[in-house]
Image: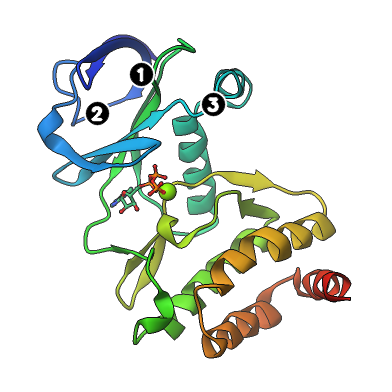
Amino acid sequence: MQLNKITIDREKCWFFCRGESSLIIENNIPNELMYKENECSHLYMHGDRILKVCFAQSWPKDSIRKYVWRSQAEREIDSAKLLAELGLSTPKEYFSAFSLSPFNRVESIHEMSFLNDHENLNKHISTRHNSENIVRLIAEDLVTMTNNMVCLKDFGLGNIMYHPNTHISWIDNDIKNFSDKKRLACFLMEHLIPRLLRHIDARDEEVFWNVFRARSIMYNEMMAEYLCCSN
Ligand SMILES: Nc1ncnc2c1ncn2[C@@H]1O[C@H](COP(=O)(O)OP(=O)(O)OP(=O)(O)O)[C@@H](O)[C@H]1O
Ligand SMILES: [Mg+2]
């Protein structure tokens, strides 16, 4: 771990850094590498790497969380590592840094491999000719996660990258562990699955449930949850 003063958007701040960055040059992130500006993050890209700058989102929650559960970047890195151990595709992580100051706009930074030839799924997937394949890939990965009693807190199509006809990769991950099947089933049915189903048509929804029926250890609990909520 190294302490460095890094300039981001003309603001200098001290960061505890881990790993090697190829986008931070002489402790500065060059503005011309800006790739995407989001409300909660800025992404910089060069060559085969992408660097995500995460902004503090809520005070004091963010600061407390940083000390108890680690920074946003570290949580993303740990979650990506866990998913990779389960055999899912995630970007390779190279570098992370976090600021200790609760008043700094930038909470943390991390640098990972740029997923070349992938497209973000944040569009209506049912209008794609290969939507069935995409839905099957998503369902298979969700089954793998939930069979291992983990789930994504922030599931959304915007956090899934699709490599046409081969695989999907998961980005912006924040994993929640469950010890109880009923609680996980409830989380899936109330929060996660509705976020997917509203973007797919009835035919793809059948594909989705077929994968769960065939492979998920959670299927019975999920159906019980469904019956309980629909009565
Ligand atoms: N490793 C990567 N390879 C390629 N593109 C990436 C990668 N990581 C992020 N992106 C691109 O940057 C966008 C935003 O990334 P991310 O979801 O991590 O940030 P965010 O702050 O949560 O943004 P959003 O609010 O859009 O979800 C993604 O939708 C994707 O297009
Ligand atoms: Mg995101």
Rendered location of residue 21, percent (x, y): 24, 28
Instruction: Judge the density around disc 1: few (<14), some (14-19), many (≥20) Cα neighbours within 10 Å.
Output: many
* Badge 2 amino acid: Ser
Q: Quadrant of the N terminus?
A: top left
Q: Is mark 3 within 8 Å of ligand 1?
A: no
Residue 45 image offset from top left, x and y in percent: 19, 41
Decide which of tag 3 and tag 2 comes sooner along the chain: 2
Instruction: Looking at the image, tell me whether mark 3 or mark 1 is earlier in sequence order.
Output: 1
* Residue 21, label in figure: 2
Q: CB of residue at label 1: within 8 Å of ligand 1? A: no
The answer as to whether callout 2 falls within 8 Å of ligand 1 is no
Which image quarter holds the C terminus?
Answer: bottom right
Residue 58's disc is 3
Residue located at (45% from left, 85% from top): 132
Q: Quadrant of residue 8?
A: top left
Number of residues whose C-alpha sits closer than 10 Å to that of mark 3, classed few (under 14), some (14–19) or many (20 or more) = few
Q: Is residue 137 left or right of residue 42?
A: right
Above or below for 164 versus 105: below
Label 1 – label 2 distance at C-alpha: 9 Å
Q: Residue at x 76, y 68 (%)?
A: 218
| Element type at mark 3 | loop
Q: Residue at x 49, y 77 (%)?
A: 135
Q: Is there a contact, CB below 8 Å, between mark 1 and mark 2?
A: yes
Tell me where residue 93 appears, x and y as whole percent. Answer: 36, 39
Dot 1 amino acid type: Cys
Quarter of the view holding residue 89 = bottom left
Kindly report the distance in space between the C-alpha atoms of the residues bearing marks 3 and 2: 27 Å
Q: What amino acid is at disc 3?
A: Ser
Mark whose residue sits in front, 3 or 2: 3
